Every structure is written in structure tokens, then in C-alpha cells.
Image (cartoon, rainbow, N blue to C red):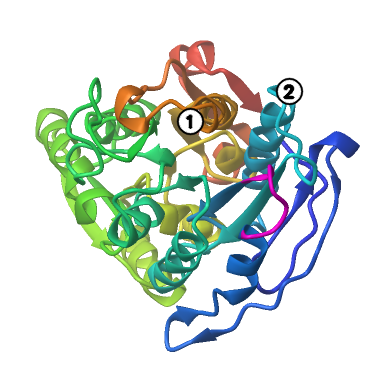
Amino acid sequence: MDCDVSRSNDSLVRLDPSAGAKPMRRRDFITLVGGGAAAWPLAARAQQANGVRHIGVLMGLSDSVPELRGFVNSFVQELARLGWIDGRNVQIEQRWTNADVHRATAFARELVAAQLDVILSSTTPATAALKRESSTVPIVFTIVSDPVGMGFVASLAHPGGNITGFTHTDAGLGGKWLGLLKEIVPGIKRAGIIFNPDTAPGGGTFFLASFEVAASRLGVEPIALPVHSDAEIEAAITGLGREQAALAAMDDSFTAVHQTTIISASVRNNVPAIFAGPPAFAREGALVSYGADLTDLFPRAAGYVDRILRGEKPSNLPVQTPTKFYTTINLKTAKALGLAFPDKILALADEVIE
């Protein structure tokens, strides 16, 4: 899912949905000094234009991925459908952290200081950064795995504070990823699960339990692979290749941003790999991707933002869970790895890339 979005090195993007999603920019210079951000340009804008509402967007991912830019574009377009036109009666400020927790902290501080009406966040680290900065600014999250465990909300049904939103997964998916790998490659005896403990839900523990339970049931040795850089990714996957092991890339903003490194290293080392996440991963070359349909999360989040702008409180808006999961398989990658997908998996796949 692509969209026309301009980029800048300061990770600030503005969209104008009323112009058919063509890019519209008003460049603002942001300096990062010692992990902090200069908030004065945004704060000044937030005090302008009586009657104009102000929305922040803090994306814990990279705007270099077309599908991710498309998700935010769909949020802006749905707001427009609901009557909130960027540049007319609402101003929308975007920040992209590129899965960098320090940038998340700096941008969260900047957005909260601007006293915006509501902030959309995406990923656990971005939401956590905003929570640390404010207990009053309304926040609507997306792509968060464990909002209760992270302390974002008191419960899914009754959030109870200034935060609510949309989850996209559950802890049991760790076992599902390994189960799919075992069906695709029945002979595997070892399987790694790669993640960054600084950005993965619960430091990685959220999915590890179900992954390890499934490994015991399937007779597979589980290997936890915490990584923090491309170099560590390369080393971890090279090691799996020597052991003829398979790989699951955990649902983690870091693995999403570093998908190209993980995919290329997996194919190069003959390691069958499943990505937790949207079809884009398989389209980019991963053997298989499995995860929630993210395409409707951001329009649904726009609905919550609309309700908050019209006076409802986040504490009264229940956290919503995903309704559809997608399996996408890449036959080109399977051929490169010398694998053949079982008919059962082919029949269940929502998308087959040939």
C-alpha cells in the first residue's frame, strides 16, 4: 500500500488528504541536542489559529517503508471523511522515530509540550515515551501488543486514564509462528526468534513463553536471539545457518525497521524465516509473514480521535483487538531456499507471491 508522501531528514511529514493525498509540506527545523528536541516551533504553531484543533502523530517506525506511510495516510484521509481537514480545521504534526527509543523520548516530549488536543501513537516504545511525558493529553495508540502489561491501560474494557487504542496481536502468536515454520519445514530441529529487547514487548518476554511452549511440543530447540544492530543481526542469522535452523522475526518495531537486513541474511544463509507482521514483509522477500490486518487500524484510530475531539474521554473508549489475521507466502523465496510449501499452507494463504 503506497502513497505520495514527502520525506525529510528530520522525520517530519505533513499530508493534505483533501488534495488526493498529494504531499504538502511546511518544513520545520528540529534540532536534537543530547536526546532532547527543540519544541518551540511546534509550540508556537499550537497557539495559532483559534478554532483549529491540533493532532500529533508519533510513529515508532520508519517513514521509508511505503506501506507504513500508507497507514498514516489512511488515518489522515479517514479524519477528512469525518470532517477534520488537515490545513483547514485541524493541523497534524507527524514524527517518525525509526525505532530509536531516544528519538521517541525527544519527540514525545516535544509533542506533549505543544499541548495538542490528541496524539496518535504507534508501537509500544512510542506509546511508552508519551505516557512518561503526560498523564493528561489524550493518546490513541496502534500496533501495541500488551497495553495492560505495559501499564498503558487498567483493562481493555475500561482503560481508565488518558490512553486507549487498538492492539494488533496477542502473546500466543509466538507459538503460531513456530507452528507454521514446522509445517513448512518439517525437519527443523532448531529455531531462533530474533528481537531487540529495548523495543520488543516486555523486552521480548511477551512472545517468548508461547514460542518455547510450542518448541517443546514440536520437538524443536528454541533459541532466543536478542540483537541491537545490523551487525548483530548478521551474526545471529549466520549462526542459525550453520545449525540449519529456522527463524521467527518477533513482532517488534526494530525488526520491522531492519527487515531488509533480516530478510537478506536469511536467504543468503539458507534460513527459512517467518515475519510477524503485514504482507509487506513477504512481498519484500521473507518466506512467509503472519500477522493482524493493520490496514484498518489507522482508520479505526481516526474514529477514536474524532470522538475525543468531539468531547469523549479516552477512559470511556475500550481498547479494541484485531479482527483479521493474514498469511502471506513468497514462492520465489521458497524456491531460492529449495523449499516447497505444503498444499495445506497454500490453501490457507491469503496472498501467494509468485
At which x and y percent is residue 163?
33, 39
Report the amino acid beneath label 2.
Arg
Front in this rendered view, residue 103 or 39:
39
At which x and y percent is residue 311?
47, 28
Report the amino acid beneath label 1.
Ile
Residue matched to label 1:
308
Question: Could you tell me what secondary structure mostly forms the magenta stretch?
Answer: loop
How far apart marks 1 and 2 lie (CA) works out to: 16 Å
For the point 33% across and 26% down, which residue is it? 319
Front in this rendered view, residue 210 or 88:
88
Residue 200 on the magenta span: no
Q: Residue furthest front?
A: 50
For the point 85% across and 51% down, which residue is it? 23
Q: Are marks 1 and 2 in contact (CB under 8 Å)?
A: no
Position of the N terminus, as image quadrant, is top right
How many neighbours does mark 1 have within 10 angstroms: few (below 14), some (14-19), or many (20 or more)? some
Residue stretch rendered in magenta on the structure: 47-53
Q: Is residue 89 visible?
A: yes
Position of the C terminus, as image quadrant, is top right
State the mark number for residue 81.
2
Q: Secondary structure at mark 2?
A: helix
For the point 70% across and 39% down, which residue is it? 73
Question: Looking at the image, is 91 positioned above or below residue 262?
Answer: above
Residue 52 on the magenta span: yes
How many neighbours does mark 2 have within 10 angstroms: few (below 14), some (14-19), or many (20 or more)? few
Question: Mark 1 against mark 2, which lies toward the viewer?
Answer: 1
Front in this rendered view, residue 217 or 327:
327
For the point 59% across and 83% down, which residue is it? 31
Q: Secondary structure at mark 1?
A: helix
At which x and y percent is residue 339?
50, 35
Describe residue 193's horizontal placement relative to residue 296 as left or right: left
